[in-house]
Image (cartoon, rainbow, N blue to C red):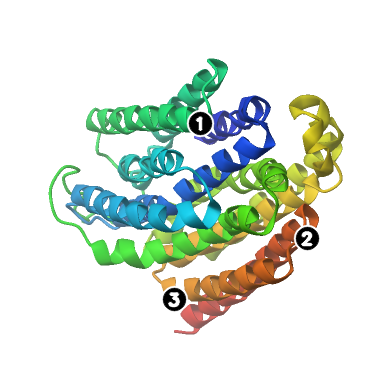
Amino acid sequence: MTVGAMVANIAAYLVALPASRALGAVDYGVFGVVMAAMVIAAAPSMAVQAVIAREVVRGRPGLTTLGLRAAALVAMFSLVAGVVLVPLTRIPMSAAAAGLVMAPLITVTAAAQGFLQGRGQFHRLGWLLGLVGLLRSGPIIVALGLGAAATGALWAGALGTLAAAGVAWSLLRISPSDTAKGSVPPDAHQGNTFSSGAGVGSVLAASQVQLALLVAVSLDLLLARVVLSATDAGVYALGAVATKAAFWLPQAIGTVVYPRLAAPERDSRSLRMALGVVAGIGAVTVVGTWVLSPLVPRIVGEEYRPLTGILWLFAATGAVLSLLALLLLAVIAVRRTTIGLAVWACTALEAVAILGWADSVTSLVAIAATAATVMTALCLVAVISAERSSRRA
């Protein structure tokens, strides 16, 4: 499964190379902002996958309509997001529409992934993750190669995302419905994958946590076009690729460990071990980024040379946020989603700091890195306190 997740991540970030060269810094800034907005709009997709996986582990029947209801909510949220995004970030309406139409499709795909994750079918899930990543990213790369502008490339990605959703549910239909041995009590009812009935409340509670996380991951990039020049915002957008790469690279660890965190008889050692692995991956990513950063001008062009000395800081921000993502998964697993409010508070303060003090690429990434560190530390303290309270009870 880890290989599949890595293929998906590599495919997603390979898009940055042709996009940055073909579009130039200014247009790449538009492309980057739209992709960041799409990720935020699709935040419930992560919650849908997590909630379905959790409830499959616990034997709850009738979860399929959960994905469809969530996709409808995401579609409505995307419309509102587009109305706000276009005037705030000065991007074309057609480009915003292309990006935001992907969000409900991603949510539908995530529902299928949640069933496979909850059943412990990680081999199938790995294949699906890799294939979905290729279907989403491949059309964008092809469109850019054919000379498409940012809007055309984004619409190509939307078509690929639609195909990925179809493939995900086709694979789920032909998958056996057995769950991982030992993950569900013997008398638990596994339920019919395609039956009706779902708890939207659980998804909404988990969604606010995942939305807080994805806003924290993307806020600096979204506001870059507000506080920086168009050229600097494009440079920042390419630097943010390192942030996203470091953030998403270890996500397979959380996917694997989540069913253990959600099981009725949890073992806190699973979380500690997962945190150690994610931290190790993050450290390697930061060092690797620092070593390779002098090659940036040669690979993507001289206009991105300002990144050579600070690209490691983008990667460090993503690495810290990957720890936050794992901690918030643990929060969702035990339904202590109110901890997400601390992330929202930190994100609000980060926005104030960016709007008040960020006037360069360096100052903006420094604020983002500081905010990521603070909110991760607060969440770690909250999770440790919750574990201690649970043991005393």
Work out which quarter of the rendered image holds the C terminus and state it: bottom left
Residue under the image location 86 percent in, 34 percent down: 294
- Quote the CA–CA distance across marks 1 and 3: 32 Å
Reading the image, the residue beneath label 2 is 363
Provide the secondary structure element on which disc 1 rests: helix
Instruction: Report whether residue 203 is seen.
Output: yes
Provide the secondary structure element on which disc 3 rests: helix
- Residue 190 in the image: x percent, y percent? 21, 49
Give whichever of discs 1 and 2 has the lower sequence position: 1
- Residue 28 in the image: x percent, y percent? 62, 37
Nearest the eye: 81 or 265? 81
- Quote the CA–CA distance across marks 2 and 3: 31 Å
Reading the image, the residue beneath label 3 is 338
**Would you place residue 74 above or below residue 101 in this image?**
below
Nearest the eye: 276 or 63? 63
Residue under the image location 33 percent in, 53 percent down: 79
Q: Is residue 244 left or right of residue 65?
A: right
- Residue 201 in the image: x percent, y percent? 27, 67
Q: Is residue 145 left or right of residue 82?
A: right
Instruction: Please state which amino acid type lies under the numbered disc 1.
Output: Gly
The residue mark sitting in front, 1 or 2, is: 2
Provide the secondary structure element on which disc 2 rests: helix
Give whichever of discs 1 and 3 has the lower sequence position: 1
Instruction: Report whether residue 270 is seen.
Output: no
Mark 3, Cα crowd under 10 Å, few <14 / some 14-19 / many 20+, is some
Residue under the image location 38 percent in, 45 percent down: 103
- Residue 285 in the image: x percent, y percent? 74, 43
Give whichever of discs 2 and 3 has the lower sequence position: 3
Instruction: Please state which amino acid type lies under the numbered disc 3.
Output: Thr
Reading the image, the residue beneath label 1 is 4
- Quote the CA–CA distance across marks 1 and 2: 36 Å
